[in-house]
Image (tube, coloured by chain):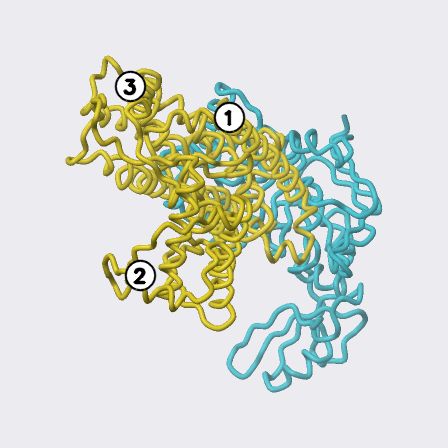
Amino acid sequence: MMLYVKELRRVVFSKIFILFFAAEVFFAFFTQFWHDMGLSYKSYDPPVPGGDYGMMVVDDPPTLTQEATASLINDYINNKYTTYPYGFIHTVHLKGTDKDKIAAILNKLTGITDLDKYASGLKVECSYDDYNQYVVPELGVLDNVSIDDFHALMTEADNILGGGSVYSPDEIMVNFSLGPMTYEEALAEYNGLINDDRITNGYARLFCDYHGIFMVLLPVFLITVYLSSDRRSKMQQLIFSRRISSVKLVMARFAALVTAEMLPVIFTAFLANVRVAQYYDPAMMDPFAMFKYSFIWILPTAVAVTGIDMLLTGLIPAVAVVIIQFGVWFMTAVMGSMSSDFGVFDLVIRHNTEMDRKGFMDNINVFAQNRLFFTALGLVCTLMYVFVWNLRREGRLGESKLLSKMSLHKS
Amino acid sequence: MDDKIEIRNVSKKYGSKTALENIDLTIGKGMFGLLGRNGAGKTTLMKTLAALHPKNSGTITVCGVPIEETKKIRTMTGYLPQDFSMYPTMRVEECLDYLGVLSGMDKALRKERADMLLKKVNLEKHRRKKVKELSGGMKRRLGIAQALLHDPRVLIVDEPTAGLDPEERIRFRNLLGEVAEDRIVILSTHIVGDIEASCEMAAVMNEGRILWTGNVKDLLKDAEGKVWTVTIESRFLPQIKSLYSVTGMVMQGSQTTVRFVHEGTPDVTGAAQTAPCLEDAYIYCLFKNGCIDLGGEE
């Protein structure tokens, strides 16, 4: 315990921790959660019958097939497809056989053989940025193909476009299968937030959604700088020669790092409560929700990232660890879906709304498995780091010329 | 438990390079000097004794405990590496407290030992200073304090006086002499003066081998009758250097007084025998073992 306290002091009084803390608070909280609930924010009122409650994803194959196919026809005629292959916007213009392949897909979906001739008979609804939006009449797609074949053809179109398009399996429903929300559905959503979630549980999911993204990226700087301080300070040999067991020292450092990584989350959880209380009656709020979600949602991320980065830092240079971690962050956080359809092995769990309690709860078992998996992964990696650290301590790993050159901890 | 370190037939290789070759040494209580050139294998031997490097073969026992029992060895050993420092923003007393925790000491004992050692190494007034504010000599003294913190039976100090000014060097040697009263202290150095001033027993190492070990007086005795001085015209200096192992030169105008080691009578007019100092004895030891050619070159 004494060692843990000393290690924690070393971490939190370091310059890199101050930078980490400021970055986590600024990027994961102030620019996101705090900003979302800015001056123009309005709290939810109970829905009234006959109102407009917005759109929601519905299971309606005729709507899906019509809307998606009409969109593909528009893109084909304009030869302009917007995709997000690596999280960034990209406009695709097809030529030659790829263009013919899209035409063939549309032919299977609609039976239309000459799309140029077909386009000449369509009316332009509006134009923007050299793109003509045509009014496409009812196509009767399901008369030509089954719903499974439709999905297969849309996936093929997405592959031709290089992936990341609105026709990809991850995106097609949220883009084309939308229907108006009914009063009952709107009321259920409202009650889910106000009564079941006691307001803050819903906002806590949004709060954790943002923190989860940055908790994958930012700790790597804290971990690599902290772990390399023994070598940089020429203190490594003094520590190696002490009586303490390698397990005890590494675990104390691991616990100190994880605690330090959670400090900005805990700090902003207080602020998030204050922010939500500006719009809702505090008596109706769950005052512990932000903290509860922080521990079950963000703590496993911190454990996993710390364990993995400690192990990597023991084996490869700090710069390489940062690059790898950045790659993981980019693939999981930037390119991932923002909805709650996460899997067991998604390090970043997204749920970018305070609403949709039902969508989250429907996936709660996967959430629990996911968090347990990453907690276990973090602990296993930390134990592997104990082994690596002990090899270095006994001068066994440092004797490998390759590892010595690569490693952060030269002995 | 024995108060001695026994090293038997120890060898160590880094890839194809032999760092230690069949080392046999017995080191008892008091100051023991390990003298050798840079790269002689002293640091490897020190690290092996501190359980920081594995040996390839042979046996080592520290006060009766095999070196493989690393936890016990670390409990009874204090180590001061050649090139060390501490977290620069930590205060002196915080450093000792932190390392005391790593040595498994309770709070009261850490405070008692740190107070006593800071007084002993004359850093009491600087206990609130940050490590980055300490001079080189102060850092070395703090290094000794940390190595003695858990009251080890064996103290291993690797090149502790390199880079210190003469005053700090003397102070440091005296400090080592004091702590060696009731424990084994192994002092590794390439500075002959450190051994001469502080060690009764010593060993000379070269290219991973022990060339000589015993009482320092015996090393001097070996060199008796082998050290010569002669005053020559400076223009003959290159010839002298090519024929003998020169250990010292003093130039006075066009004349140079040369000190050199040689077995038998040198073929130089006016050469006279002189009493050896430890530096002469060390060079003679290297010369006798074929580690340096005539002229003192490797």
Q: Colour of chain A?
A: yellow
Q: How far apart, in angstroms, are the residues tagged by discs 2 and 3?
A: 47 Å
Amino acid at the residue labelled 3? Ile
Q: Colour of chain B?
A: cyan
Mark 1 and mark 3 in contact (Cβ < 8 Å)?
no
Q: How far apart, in angstroms, are the residues tagged by discs 3 and 1?
A: 61 Å
Q: Which residue is mark 3?
A: A194
Q: Residue B142: percent from the left, percent from the top?
A: 48, 39
Callouts 1 and 2 on one subunit: no
Left or right? Give the position of A314 relative to B278: left
- Frontmost of labels 3 and 1 is 3
Amino acid at the residue labelled 2? Leu
Please, which chain is the residue tagged with disc 2 on? A
Crowding at mark 1 (Cα within 10 Å: few <14, some 14-19, many 20+):
many
Amino acid at the residue labelled 1? Arg
Crowding at mark 3 (Cα within 10 Å: few <14, some 14-19, many 20+):
many
Q: Which residue is mark 1?
A: B113
Please, which chain is the residue tagged with disc 1 on? B
B35 in relation to B248, above or below: above
Q: Residue A24: percent from the left, percent from the top?
A: 34, 39
User: What is the quadrant of residue A356 in the picture?
Assistant: top left
* Earlier sequence position, callout 2 versus callout 3: 2
